[in-house]
Image: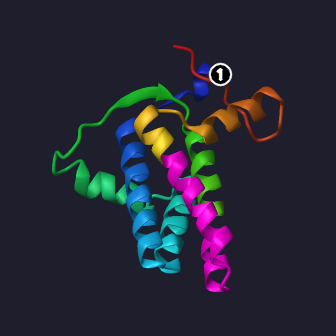
Amino acid sequence: MATETLRKVDQTGIKVGQGTTIVLLLLGFVLNSWLLVGIVAVSQLLSAFDAPFAPYRLLYQRVIKPLGITRPNVIRDNPEPHRFAQLLGGLMNTAAAALLLVGVPTPAWVLVWVVIALANLNFWLNFCLGCWMYYQLHRLGVPGFTQSPVEG
């Protein structure tokens, strides 16, 4: 583990993003809305690239935290695996929105439900499959996957 690259991650912020993803994708499914799936995709992709104006970040930092709805839960962790997970979800939802736009709903909704299931897995059981994949790619020496798991 490279101690100098270890940072802290606010798990509550991550949970807000997961919960928002779940709610918006479920609503998108019920309303058969490619637009809601697209909004989630853009939000996830902006989070993956650590954009300061990422909607999930803004929701947490400017609304949820100031109102005291939840408390920060800052832990020693690497943000890269979480961003990788957001990237995977964003890519899946981008593909789903595109498929919905061209009239191919079944594989689109399968992708959406995979993201919903994985977001729930992380939200409720604290298991991030994207993070696990990131660390496996690091272990295999794949370029770009530079962080090892935090020991704790």
Magenta residue check for 102: yes
* Amino acid of disc 1: Ala
Q: Disc 1 designates what residue?
A: 2
Q: Position of residue 101 (x, y in %)?
A: 62, 84
Can residue 62 be seen in this snapshot?
A: yes
What residue lies at 43% left-to-right and 50% top-to-bottom? 18
Q: Residues within 10 Å of mark 1 (few under 14, many from 20)?
A: few
Magenta residue check for 77: no
* Left or right: residue 55 compared with residue 49: left
* Left or right: residue 97 compared with residue 37: right
Can residue 95 be seen in this snapshot?
A: no
What residue lies at 43% left-to-right and 64% top-to-bottom? 26
Q: Position of residue 35 (x, y in %)?
A: 49, 79
Q: Quadrant of residue 13?
A: top left
What residue lies at 55% left-to-right and 32% top-to-bottom? 78
Q: Magenta region, mostly helix, strand or loop?
A: helix
As drawn, the residue found furthest toward the top would be 152
- Looking at the rendered structure, the number of numbered marks drawn on it comes to 1
**Vertical placement of residue 33 versus 108, above or below:** below
Q: Position of residue 106 (x, y in %)?
A: 65, 72
Q: Which residues are magenta?
A: 93-119
